[in-house]
Amino acid sequence: MNVEPKPRYAEKRITKTVLGLRAARIWQGLTRKSAAQICGCTPKAFEQLENGRVDFSEARLKRLLELMGVSWNEFQNIQDDPNRYLAEAKSMFSPAVNCDKKPRRNTYKLITKRQG
């Protein structure tokens, strides 16, 4: 009797809704941490929502979007083509985000090995 082994982890479902939620957050210029604070949940919980690890109802989605400042009609447009909105948002907000970051630690490393 051959029994197929159960998958170790449930398959991650990436749907248009999940991509739309991420695109809406980035389009609003929010980080996960700030979006989680606005929505009244932890950053980890918001990350799980965005990554499709947690199922959520349409009512909860509408409430989250309303708190983030995205109307349902806007979300429907974002959901239809999330990649376009992600590209627009990244082009609008990436320079401002990158300017605030410290250089990586490896930029300060000194090379101490002798050549040859």
Image (tube, rainbow, N blue to C red):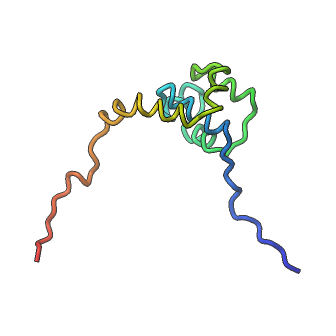
In the figure, is residue 113 to the left or right of 57?
Answer: left
Rendered residue at 51%/34% (across/down): 86
Identify the residue at image location x=44%, y=34%.
90
Tell me what residue is drawn at x 20 percent, y 56 percent: 109
In screen coordinates, is 72 left or right of 88? Answer: right
In the foreground, 29 or 87: 87
Which residue is rendered at x = 76% and y = 66% of the image?
A: 6
**Quick one: 102 or 98, which is closer to the camera?**
98
Residue that protrudes farthest toward the right in the picture: 1
Where does the image place residue 105, in percent across and percent down from the top left? Answer: 27, 51
Q: Position of residue 54 (x, y in %)?
A: 69, 43
30 vs 43: above or below? above
Quarter holding residue 96: top left
Residue 1 sits above or below residue 104 on the image = below
Residue 7 rendering spot, x and y as whole percentages: 73, 64
Q: Which quadrant of the figure contains the N terminus?
A: bottom right
Left or right, 3 with respect to 113, comes to right
Q: Place residue 57 in its image quadrant.
A: top right
